Amino acid sequence: MVIDMKCKKILSFVIILILLAVLFVVAVNSGSVKVSYGELLKGIFIEHNDNVNIILDLRFPRILIAMLSGAALAVSGVLFQAVLKNPLADPGIIGISSGAGFVSAIIIAFFPTWFLFTPIFSFLGGMVACVIVYSLSYKNGFSPLRIILVGIAINAVFSGLSSGFGSMSSQNYQGASELINANISMKTWNDVKLLGVYVVIGLVLAFVISGKCNLLALEDKTVRGLGVNVNGLRVVISIVAVLLASITTAVAGAISFVGLIVPHMGRLLVGSEHKLLVPFSALLGAFVMLLADTVGRLIAYPYEISPAIIMSVVGGPFFIFLLKNFRCIMFVNTKKHINSPTLRICSISVKTS
């Protein structure tokens, strides 16, 4: 049985790597400009080709940004779900992405010369949103329902403020409008470099702390008994999660549901061990985001649909499915803490009947 589970996990990694490679090849040659794969390789490594240069300058950055964004958002979702013990936690749903997007829109609209510092300001905006959500949601512990309700409210506020920039027609606000609408069609290699540096740092940090995420599934007093500062651990993991979500928002815009869908798919395939779940979610998130972008380019060709819209169409029903089929909350009476009932996550069990 143990061998079978190990083989399943290894096979899952192999399959997702193959699928990601195949999708990458398909995405490269999907669009108005097409070349044979022989011409593509020849144009990259041997001699100049105008069509190949168009693909390199326009399509490759878009593909890489989609993959990096998907990986970052998926891992961010894994970390938030671990910290909050909430299977419905997603940086887009609980308002982190919208807070980061609002600050990014301000920087792009009013301080375009600060472009290189946009990820830093975006991170600060995400942290502000995170602190607001945490502070308003905490009452004798984190209530899963309260987190979602507060997050939706914060998301609505920041999204409304950001939409004000999107409604402006001035040329000065074009970049902000593209960011708000999560439009990655005109991204360049500079955007890839900017996003790549921060995402790689965030993913490395996430992998380093992934082993500690397993401890958060235990009761706080049990973790303290192991000599671990629970609150400090939650803060560190939350900072890494906000970093990944905010940096993605600064470049690709606010994209919801990637951090909700991918972690659950990952747990079904490789289990809940975070040392495996984090890297697998990064690969699966890259695949899901690239698939959404490719479908958006092809489904209504020659028009394009933003990957954020594709993810919303798919993620909305999935969110409802989780609400309907997962029992996440129960009332627990305990004399060891306080006399009144407290809400806490106790298990994630799928209804079988």
Image: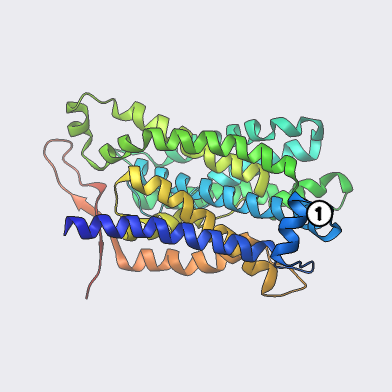
Q: Mark 1 — residue?
A: 53
The residue at 29%/25% (across/down) is 229
Q: Nearer the viewer, residue 99 or 21?
A: 21
Q: Position of residue 149 (x, y in %)?
A: 44, 52
Quadrant in which the C terminus appears: bottom left
Q: Is residue 184 visible?
A: no
Q: Determine the residue located farthest toward the front in the rendered image.
A: 46
Q: Position of residue 265 (x, y in %)?
A: 39, 60
The residue at 47%/49% (across/down) is 282
Q: Which element is circle 1 on?
A: helix
Q: Nearer the viewer, residue 324 or 156?
A: 324
Residue count near mark 1 (Cα–Cα under 10 Å), binned few <14, some 14–19, many ≥20:
some
Quadrant in which the N terminus appears: bottom left
Q: Position of residue 283 (x, y in %)?
A: 48, 52
Q: Is residue 240 left or right of residue 190?
A: left
The residue at 37%/33% (across/down) is 209
The residue at 50%/64% (across/down) is 315
